[in-house]
């Protein structure tokens, strides 16, 4: 999907964390950076991993990288406890 002005996000959802870990092991991490790492001149895609999600974000905006990562890792809002 396209986010903002030209950034793209690929989201992969898995039935459980074991399946996500197995699929994530196949990624070429030499061309990916974590959401908290600085991009280099290579302009790597940002790898976002949570329990059953892998997100691949192409964005040069550090603010956008942080916001998308936070949204995917945090998940949906949780109901308040009484």
Image (tube, grey):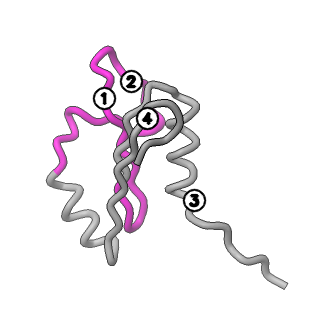
Label whose residue precedes the other's in the sequence (3 or 1)? 1
Crowd class of label 1 (few under 14; some 14 to 19; many from 20; radius 10 Å) = many
Kindly identify which residue carries mark 2.
Answer: 39
Q: Which residue is depicted at the point 35% across and 56% down?
A: 54
Q: Residue at x 79, y 81 (%)?
A: 81
The residue beneath circle 3 is 74
- What is the residue that sits farthest to the bottom in this orientation? 82
Residues at marks 1 and 4, CA–CA distance in whole angstroms: 13 Å
Q: Nearer the viewer, residue 81 or 8?
A: 8
For label 4, the residue is 7
Left or right of 29: which side holds 7?
Answer: right
Comparing marks 1 and 4, which lies closer to the viewer? 4
Residue 13 placement: quadrant: bottom left
Residue marked by disc 1: 44
* Disc 4 versus disc 3: nearer the observer: 4
Farthest residue in the right direction?
A: 82
Proximity of marks 1 and 4: CB atoms separated by less than 8 Å: no
Marks 2/1 in contact by CB < 8 Å: the verdict is yes
Q: Quadrant of the C terminus?
A: bottom right
| Residue 67 highlighted magenta (yes or no) | no
- Pointer 4 local density, CA inside 10 Å: few below 14, some 14–19, many at least 20: some
> Where does residue 20 sit, x and y in percent of width and height?
28, 65
Q: Secondary structure at mark 2?
A: loop
What are the residue bounds of the magenta stretch?
27-54
Estimate the x, y position of residue 39 in percent, counting from the top left. 38, 24
The answer to the question of whether label 2 and label 4 lie on touching residues, with beta carbons closer than 8 A, is no
Marks 4 and 3, how far apart at CA = 21 Å
Which one is earlier in the sequence, the residue at label 2 or at label 1?
2
- Element on which disc 3 rests: helix
The x and y percentages for residue 53 are 38, 62
Q: Which mark is first along the chain, 2 or 3?
A: 2
């Amino acid at each position: 999907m396209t986010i903002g002005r030209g950034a793209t996000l690929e989201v992969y959802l898995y039935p459980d964390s074991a399946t996500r870990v197995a699929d994530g092991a196949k990624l070429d991490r030499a061309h990916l950076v974590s959401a908290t790492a600085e991009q280099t001149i290579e302009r790597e895609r940002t790898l976002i991993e949570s329990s059953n999600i892998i997100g691949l974000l192409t964005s040069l905006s550090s603010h956008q990288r942080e916001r998308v990562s936070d949204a995917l890792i945090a998940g949906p809002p949780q109901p308040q406890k009484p």
